């Protein structure tokens, strides 16, 4: 990893943080409805894993899916529009927070059913085997999914058939509001893969370098040998399970202690101490991202709502296996298209205000990094 790559990873994590913070604000203002599950605190896992992928690889996630889409390169405007139910959303305003899909980027999206997407990940891996390519699939899920039957079914068939899927447990210690100690008889969740003879590791999910190292090894092994893996990333979410969760099952002191290991704060310190970036450079990229979020909000405000006719779209994809006599009576069939619908190309973002000129690199790094000052807000 060179200096520019290290800075790009910092920008990605900070973009996710600022996006989620703005989403929380819009939710409180009533501009985002339904459920909203934030990724704040877990950024090093998604960025560390996805930064190791090739453009033709796949990802599939649970309902806490905003961060992965941003790490994979989706336009934050289309994501915020989806949260707001706009026609310009990444799923055309029909999926909302838990259903971000971006097929051109290999993102098979979020799944609102706990553990429900793990067998789908195995199916993606099986498709890779049939095609004979060196692609891989990353499957993200929380610690609450490991007691679901779908977890064991997916791991078993993946190990049995050598499917190139990396199953990633983001263990943030609480499945909804129930602590891991009260929910699992096995505390080292990655050891569950031993029942299926699958390679397994745990990793500090607050450490970006550790995440990149462990995920990189698993991805390369899957490319070469088609062997799956189970990786447990021990991380932490600063907010409740969703915006409706006050988080009273844990203490304020516990959250504050975990925030001392904030992945963005720690990576910013590393950039200043080892890569000789100046504080002004980190501040400048923060201002750039904040301006990008303001542009995203303006884009959403100017975007149209879905039309009533769009209810009939995206229900079917034309297929020779459809019973035509029955389907032709259905208005949704008449509105379907030959290929999966994806959002239209968005206009380029409005130019942001010029960033302040960066200061010359310094030999000594400041004690703190205000770029992550809003982590608990």
Image: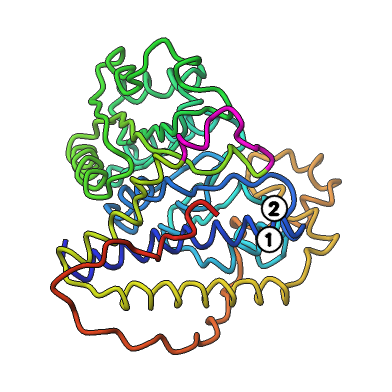
Give the side of residue 324 with respect to residue 297, left or right: right
Residue at image coords 77%, 50%:
333
When the figure is inspected, residue 68 is found, relative to residue 158, above or below; the finding is below
Q: Nearer the viewer, residue 357 or 110?
A: 357
Residue 216 is situated, as x and y percent measured from the top left of the image, at 22, 45
When the figure is inspected, residue 182 is found, relative to residue 295, above or below; the finding is above
Q: Which residue is mark 2?
A: 314
**CA gap, disc 2 to disc 1?**
28 Å
Would residue 376 be visible to someone looking at this image? yes
Residue at image coords 45%, 29%:
173
Residue 323 is situated, as x and y percent measured from the top left of the image, at 73, 38
Q: Nearer the viewer, mark 2 or mark 1?
A: 1
Magenta segment range?
244-255
Dividing the picture into quadrants, the one containing residue 366 is: bottom left
Residue at image coords 39%, 58%:
13
- Number of labels in the image equals 2
254 magenta-colored: yes
165 magenta-colored: no
Dividing the picture into quadrants, the one containing residue 31 is: bottom right
């Amino acid at each position: 990893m060179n200096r520019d790559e290290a800075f790009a990873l910092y920008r990605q994590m900070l973009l996710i943080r600022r996006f989620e913070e703005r989403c929380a604000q819009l939710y409180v203002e009533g501009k985002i409805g339904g459920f909203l599950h934030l990724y704040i605190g877990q950024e090093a896992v998604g960025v560390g894993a996805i930064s190791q992928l090739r453009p033709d690889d796949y990802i599939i996630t649970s309902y806490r899916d905003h961060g992965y889409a941003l790490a994979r390169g989706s336009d934050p405007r289309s994501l915020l529009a989806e949260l707001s139910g706009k026609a310009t959303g990444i799923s055309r305003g029909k999926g909302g927070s838990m259903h971000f899909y971006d097929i051109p980027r290999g993102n098979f999206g979020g799944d609102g059913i706990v553990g429900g997407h793990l067998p789908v990940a195995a199916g993606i891996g099986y498709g890779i085997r049939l095609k004979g390519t060196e692609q891989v699939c990353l499957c993200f899920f929380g610690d609450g999914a490991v007691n679901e039957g779908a977890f064991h079914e997916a791991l078993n068939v993946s190990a049995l058939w050598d499917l190139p899927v990396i199953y990633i447990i983001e263990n943030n210690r609480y499945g909804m509001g129930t602590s891991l100690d009260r929910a699992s008889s096995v505390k080292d969740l990655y050891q569950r893969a031993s029942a299926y003879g699958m390679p397994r590791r745990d990793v500090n999910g607050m450490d970006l370098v550790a995440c990149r190292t462990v995920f990189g090894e698993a991805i390369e092994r899957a490319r070469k040998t088609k062997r799956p893996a189970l990786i447990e990333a021990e991380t932490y979410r600063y907010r409740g399970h969703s915006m409706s969760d006050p988080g009273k099952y844990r203490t304020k002191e516990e959250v504050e202690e975990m925030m001392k290991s904030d992945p963005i704060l720690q990576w910013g310190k590393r950039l200043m101490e080892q890569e000789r970036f100046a504080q002004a450079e980190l501040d400048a990229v923060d201002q750039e991202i904040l301006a990008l979020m303001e542009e995203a909000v303006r884009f959403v405000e100017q975007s149209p709502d879905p039309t009533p006719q769009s209810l009939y779209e995206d229900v079917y994809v034309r297929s020779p296996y459809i019973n035509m006599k029955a389907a032709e009576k259905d208005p949704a069939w008449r509105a379907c298209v030959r290929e999966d619908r994806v959002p239209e190309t968005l206009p380029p973002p409005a130019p942001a205000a010029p960033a302040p000129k960066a200061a010359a690199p310094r030999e000594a790094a400041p004690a703190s990094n205000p770029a992550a000052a809003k982590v608990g807000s």
